């Protein structure tokens, strides 16, 4: 039986390449949860204004949560842009003051190469060398040297995306520590089951008995860039461009039908597993110097020494 819901009760807000996709997959399987389709709606990142009640229902709830049913106790979504883009936590809290937020954080020295590769896969980044992409940040902040298909240049500000200490501090300040739950990637990789059950306790949901926790998803690139471009062009939707991440994640058309099988087969064939290249010693030093104070801040916030992230 269908169920009409209000604003979701929880949000997996980030960070990118920190295990959010795997965690959200586990949460999607829980019958108590109605998880958005797609996982990343990026709805609250599309407009700097708080949406009206009618906009929220038509453009968000009806579109991304129409599959909810009577067994669902809680609805949620997993847009990783919400953690690092300004004003989003505030907008969500304005609409739902009781909203809960889950964040995953990772050593930025390993997260950034993975994130950079991901941006290439999504056609948001056209510079394959991370050192050069890092060096372009100031120019891109001025609107220069932007990839032609990039939908939001803020996603290419690598230093800001990886400032987890500042992001978690902001989350705590706005939402309150009792409404924020942080999972360290190292713990998630060591025991995904424990991390998942910790998230359920935070959400005040029952243990659903899951025992299989597949590993996080490997990085990918594509065989042919032109083919990637053919199927991942952003399209207009409600006066907005749909984020490329949304198009990749969206497994259902607006009418609820599945994608054509041949499109799925072709796009799957074009994907190839690709491991991110580790940072060079020179770039490790650059990134470490840039983020050292932020990692120290995160250590204080979590009351946990994360200095080993910077060790060679």
Image (cartoon, rainbow, N blue to C red):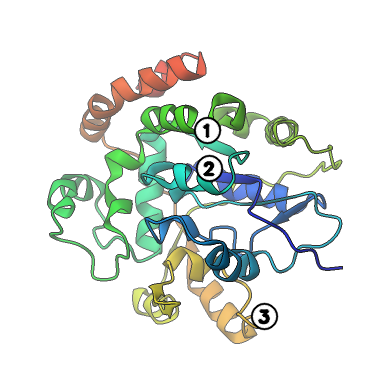
Q: Is residue 135 left or right of residue 257?
A: left
Residue under numbered circle 3: 258
Q: Is residue 238 left or right of residue 78?
A: left
Q: Nearer the viewer, residue 220 or 248?
A: 248
Is residue 266 visible to the viewer in this orientation of the structure? Answer: yes
Residue under numbered circle 2: 93
Q: Quadrant of residue 10?
A: top right
Q: Secondary structure at mark 3?
A: loop
Tag nearer the camera, 3 or 1? 1
Residue, x 40% and y 56% (percent of image)? 49
Is residue 311 visible to the viewer in this orientation of the structure? Answer: no
Sooner in the amino-acid sequence: mark 3 or mark 1:
1
Residue 148 spot, x, y in % from top left: 23, 70
Residue 310 spot, x, y in % from top left: 35, 22
Residue under numbered circle 1: 175
Label 3 – label 2 distance at C-alpha: 34 Å
Residue, x 51% and y 19% (percent of image)? 302
Q: Nearer the viewer, residue 150 or 82?
A: 82
The image shows residue 88, relative to residue 183, as above or below, that is: below
């Amino acid at each position: 039986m269908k169920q009409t819901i209000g604003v979701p009760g929880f949000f997996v807000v980030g960070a990118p390449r920190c295990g959010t996709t795997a965690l959200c997959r586990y949460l999607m399987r829980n019958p108590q949860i109605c998880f958005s389709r797609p996982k990343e709606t990026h709805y609250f990142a599309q407009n700097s204004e708080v949406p009206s009640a009618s906009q929220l229902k038509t453009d968000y709830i009806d579109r991304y949560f129409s599959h909810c049913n009577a067994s669902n106790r809680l609805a949620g979504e997993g847009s990783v842009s919400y953690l690092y883009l300004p004003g989003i936590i505030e907008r969500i809290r304005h609409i739902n003051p009781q909203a809960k937020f889950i964040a995953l954080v990772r050593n930025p020295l390993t997260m950034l190469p993975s994130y950079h590769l991901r941006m290439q896969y999504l056609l948001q980044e056209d510079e394959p060398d991370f050192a050069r992409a890092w060096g372009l940040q100031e120019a891109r902040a001025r609107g220069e040297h932007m990839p032609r298909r990039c939908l939001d240049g803020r996603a290419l500000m690598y230093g800001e995306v990886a400032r987890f200490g500042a992001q978690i501090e902001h989350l705590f300040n706005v939402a309150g520590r009792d409404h924020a739950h942080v999972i360290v990637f190292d713990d998630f990789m060591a025991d995904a089951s424990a991390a998942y059950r910790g998230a359920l306790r935070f959400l005040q949901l029952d243990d659903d008995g899951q025992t299989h926790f597949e590993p996080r998803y490997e990085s990918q690139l594509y065989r042919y860039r032109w083919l990637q471009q053919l199927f991942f062009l952003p399209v207009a939707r409600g006066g907005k461009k749909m984020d490329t991440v949304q198009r990749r994640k969206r497994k259902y058309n607006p009418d609820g039908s599945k994608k054509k099988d041949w499109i799925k087969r072709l796009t799957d064939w074009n994907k190839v597993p690709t491991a991110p290249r580790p940072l060079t010693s020179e770039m490790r030093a650059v990134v470490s110097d840039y983020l050292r104070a932020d990692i120290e801040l995160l250590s204080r916030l979590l009351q946990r020494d994360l200095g080993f992230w910077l060790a060679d």
